[in-house]
Amino acid sequence: MLSRSTKNLVRKMTLPSLVESRRPTTSPDIDPSTLSNYQQFQIQKTTLNLEVSFDQRIINGSVLYQLRSLQAQEEATNRLCLDTSYLQIHNVTLGGSKNLQWELKPRQEPLGSQLVLEYSKDKNEEHSLQIDFSTTERCTALQWLSGKQTSGKPYVFSQLEAIHARSLFPCFDTPSVKSVITANIASRYPVVFSGRIAADPSDGQNGNKIYHFEQPVPIPFYLIGIASGDLESAPIGPRSSVYTEPFRLKDAQWEFDGDVEKFIQAAEKIVFPYEWGTYDVLINVDSYPYGGMESPNMTFATPTLIAHDKSNIDVIAHELAHSWSGNLVTNCSWNHFWLNEGWTVYLERRIVGALHGEPARHLSALIGWNDLSESINAMSDPERFSKLLQDLGTKGDPDEAFSSVPYEKGFNLLFHLENKLGGPENFDPFVKHYFQKFAKQSLDTYQFLDTLYEFYQDKREILDSVDWETWLYKPGMPPKPKFDTSLADDVYELAGKWFKAAQSGDYNGFTPDDLNKVSTVQLVLFLDTLVQSENSVDWSKHADAARHLLEIYHEKVVNSQNAEIVFRKFRFQVESRIEGSYKELAQWLGTVGRMKFVRPGFRLLNKVDRPLALETFQELKDTYHPICKALVKQDLGLS
Ligand code: BES
Ligand code: ZN
């Protein structure tokens, strides 16, 4: 048998030298975005006992850890450091009775305040530690809504990815640490949680009910999701329900009914059976800042998914795919975020391909390619943020580094590998192997590469011919793969005709029927192509043509309820300097909270009418989620 060091040596020889030379010294890589000493402890189990106080707008409670110290026995005291952010700590007890002193270190942006505890325990000795705490007004993990902002009852929801779990409870706030979780949550209103329902609600104090949950699969804390409000549920599949406020329940049920189960079965064929039991969806409130969040067992989603024509359900395919990529197999730090999101986009598109055919998968990839290009063009610091492998350090804020890059560059790398290795049939055995091998673990990019090289030992030349330097470390667009454009060609042709018409001023020959056979996804590509194609015109000089286009396609474009279309319509109008649209865009920004639309929406407005952008932000800022508010503020140059 090889000794440990020789094994490392052998492995060190495996990857191309330019990649090896960048391999971190620790495997998996260390997470720079935590102030905890997570490497020195192992959590056996986490219990959250929480109480939601709508009156005070705080969550009160305790977290109980069953832990083992991995520190050497000769050290007299163990030091346990946890992440916190704007939390109030009330009490710390060891082993159920012994009160411990604690120290909360000064805040360090953007990571928060380290909570330091000292006590002595032998190496590997299991012990329990309880911390009583409350959240505060400055909590970045929760958004509280009054009854006026909902259908009448107060509401709260959490959003913890990437580093906001520390603002909900003291923890090892790193994707490197996983734990099974029990949660007992008291509230006046129904509660949903990222786990299975463990028992019927029991009676609590002050008119509260206590809701009981279990998450028996170990998960990192950023995946915890809690929401409470006037929630009801309706079935959408044999293992799935949708939860939402009663006024949206019927629409939500109609939008998702039947499709979720098809997605699950398609994903199970590509990877392996779904391990989490139930798969439910929470349709959150309007101000929900993301399209979706993959809280295990309970995807959180934006109400903008309810498009009344099932045209936005790909987002559910994406969040479901996280049940394998991200939730079972997790990036060990946010520098390797592409392992979560790139893989998830890859699986999402494989699900689309399985259900609607390869051309549909490629169409989705084409739209992703345009997104990537637009996102890199709009970056404040593309040199830094457009690399696949990020280098956040302790000063970097994952919320600020967030972009399409981990999603789309990550997807394109996997798609490139799939092509090079002989297409899905030849890539699928690796997909299964990878998810099996790293299930319930957290890994870095180098472990992914090691596994890839190990798996395709006999195809080493193919792997060595990948331009790893460009894919992994260089900023900017990656090499463009060949996409099947069979579902895109008609749309490209139509856009081309409009470029000509804009120049000639002759709009005869266009009719609403041009879009008759065009699906919503194709319409998205059409609207992207209008403004992004190399052959496009400067619409600000052809506003007349733009007006004609919007009039002819009024029904499908202007009357659309689908946020993906509505946003692109505004973008087209703003690019064409159709001034009447600015106010409408400002109004629309008061109806959506999803950052994917809110941030570029404000950027557009700012470009053409800064006073209106500032005035609109002033008016709406407190209706947005705290993260969204902070990022738009930054985008507008106000912080
Ligand atoms: N995990 C992400 C959302 C996220 C990422 C929240 C980073 C906080 C920090 C989720 O799975 C996601 O990617 N959502 C997308 C939808 C998707 C179809 C690409 C979104 O919100 O737009
Ligand atoms: Zn995702």
Image (tube, rainbow, N blue to C red):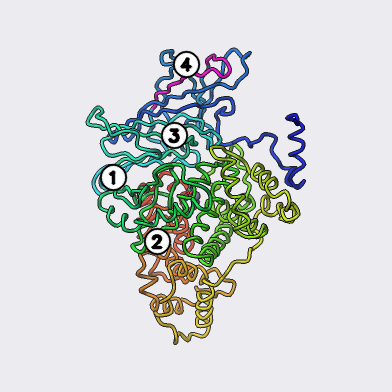
Q: Nearer the viewer, residue 378 or 14?
A: 14
Residue that badge 1 annotates: 231
* Three-letter amino acid code of the residue under disc 1: Leu
Residue that badge 2 annotates: 563
* Measured Cα–Cα span from mark 1 to mark 2: 24 Å
Left or right of 311 in this view: 473: right
Name the residue: 39% across, 44% down: 278
Left or right of 90 in this view: 343: right
Residue that badge 4 annotates: 101
Secondary element at tag 2: helix
Residue 216's disc number: 3
Vertical order, 287 against 365 (above or below): above
* Three-letter amino acid code of the residue under disc 2: Ala
* Three-letter amino acid code of the residue under disc 4: Gln
User: Which one is earlier in the sequence, the residue at label 2 or at label 3?
Assistant: 3
Vertical order, 442 against 82 (above or below): below
Count residues near mark 1 (Cα–Cα under 10 Å), then give few for <14, some for 14-19, many for 20+: many
